[in-house]
Image (cartoon, grey):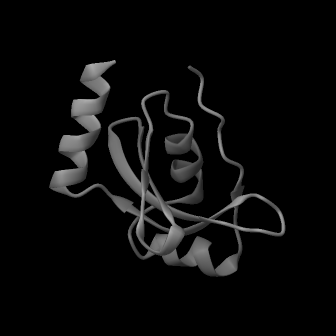
Amino acid sequence: MEKKLPKLLWDEWNTKHIVNHGVTAYEVEKAVKDKNAIYLEGKVGRQLLLGRFKKRLLAVVVNKDEKTSKMYVVTARDMDKKERKTYRKEKSDD
């Protein structure tokens, strides 16, 4: 089953915010397109995307923008140990 790729919504705030975590918008856009990306339910109606770009494993928190139906990037960072384990397990189950 092919996943529908979300269109991401960027603004000055979230673009600057992810830089604080050492992540670029380009890396996030590529991680979202990872064929092994995993989408999990996050807190407060948000979604957590676990995806890879090159050797980097990223956790991206998104929230659906009701006006545009795009996914607003709340934050992005390197996956923590538990997230990496989940990503690798799901990837190997395919």
Residue depicted at x 22% and y 32% = 89
Whether 38 is drawn above or below 71: the answer is above
Q: Quadrant of residue 91?
A: top left
Q: Position of residue 41 (x, y in %)?
A: 43, 57
In the rendered view, would you say 48 is above or below 5? Answer: below
Task: Please state which of residues 84 and 42 is positioned toward the viewer in this rendering.
Answer: 42
Residue 44: x %, y % from top left: 48, 75
Q: Is 42 positioned to the left or the right of 8 in the image?
A: left
Which residue is pictured at 59% across the width and 75% down the height?
A: 14
Front in this rendered view, residue 36 or 93: 93
Q: Residue visible at 48% across and 71% down?
A: 19
Q: Quadrant of residue 16?
A: bottom right
The residue drawn where x is 34% and y is 18% is 94
- x and y, in percent, of residue 9 in the image: 71, 63
79 sits to left or right of 76: left
Looking at the rendered image, the quarter that the N terminus falls into is top right
Number of numbered discs on residues: 0
The answer to whether residue 41 is above or below residue 56 is below
Q: Is residue 34 left or right of residue 59?
A: right
- Work out whether 64 lies above or below 4: below
Q: Nearer the viewer, residue 57 or 55?
A: 57
